[in-house]
Amino acid sequence: MNTCKGVGIVSLRLKNMMAYNSICRMLRRESDYKFAFGNSVSPAMHAWPWDTWGAGHWRKFIIGVDGTQAGFGAIFIDKPNVVCCIELGLLPQYRGMGYGGIAGRLLISKCFTEYGARLVESFALSTNLRSIGMVDWMTLEGRLQARHLIDGQEVDELIYKITKPEWAARQENT
């Protein structure tokens, strides 16, 4: 398990797959779910037995806070382009305390150290202020205006990234 200040990420295994799915199910039931994650359900929002084999493009994790299951994290590995894309979500009681930012940095670190990424990207809806706050180490690279139509409201999608040299410089300064 990778940890930092009581926040850790644990790789998906058969024994914790039900917990992963339970966390994702709770997040999907939130009243503002669509404004946080969009209309469609990402493949990151459900674990399957084959996700534990590590053979596909997805790596999935349980985010823990002081040993308690607090959220999910997922990394999509785009091998041909040497890019990783991260997704994560925290249960409501763990938001607003900096845990998401720490978990995001742990996922970014894993992308560079274990999966050999040259850059890591993440996407956030402009209506999801919690998600925007979790990408504090990343640079806002672009905005797809009115990319989503959620309950009749146009919502922008924000694109964030960090390169391996940027990440290395941040590591030296912490």
Image (cartoon, helix red, strand yellow):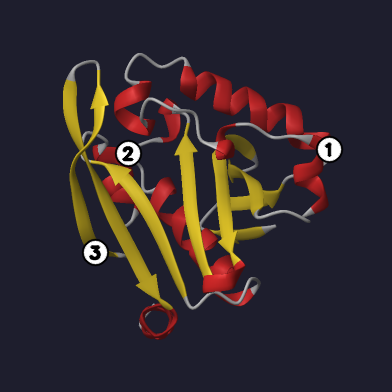
- The answer to whether residue 122 shows anywhere in this view is yes
Local SS, label 3: strand
Amino acid bearing label 2: Gly
Residue 137 in sight in this render: no
| Quarter-of-image position of residue 63 | top right
Q: Residues within 10 Å of mark 1 (few under 14, many from 20)?
A: some
Instruction: Tell me where residue 54 appears, x and y as whole percent.
Output: 77, 55
Q: Quadrant of residue 65?
A: top right
On screen, 29 above or below 99?
above
Mark-to-mark CA distance, 2 and 3: 24 Å
Return the mark for residue 96. 2
Seen at 36% across and 42% down, the residue is 97
Residue shown at 32% from the left, 39% from the top: 96
Measured Cα–Cα span from mark 3 to mark 1:
36 Å
Q: Which labelled disc corresponds to residue 141?
A: 3
Residue under numbered circle 1: 14
Amino acid type for the residue under numbered disc 3: Glu
Tally the numbered discs: 3
Name the quadrant of the N terminus. bottom right
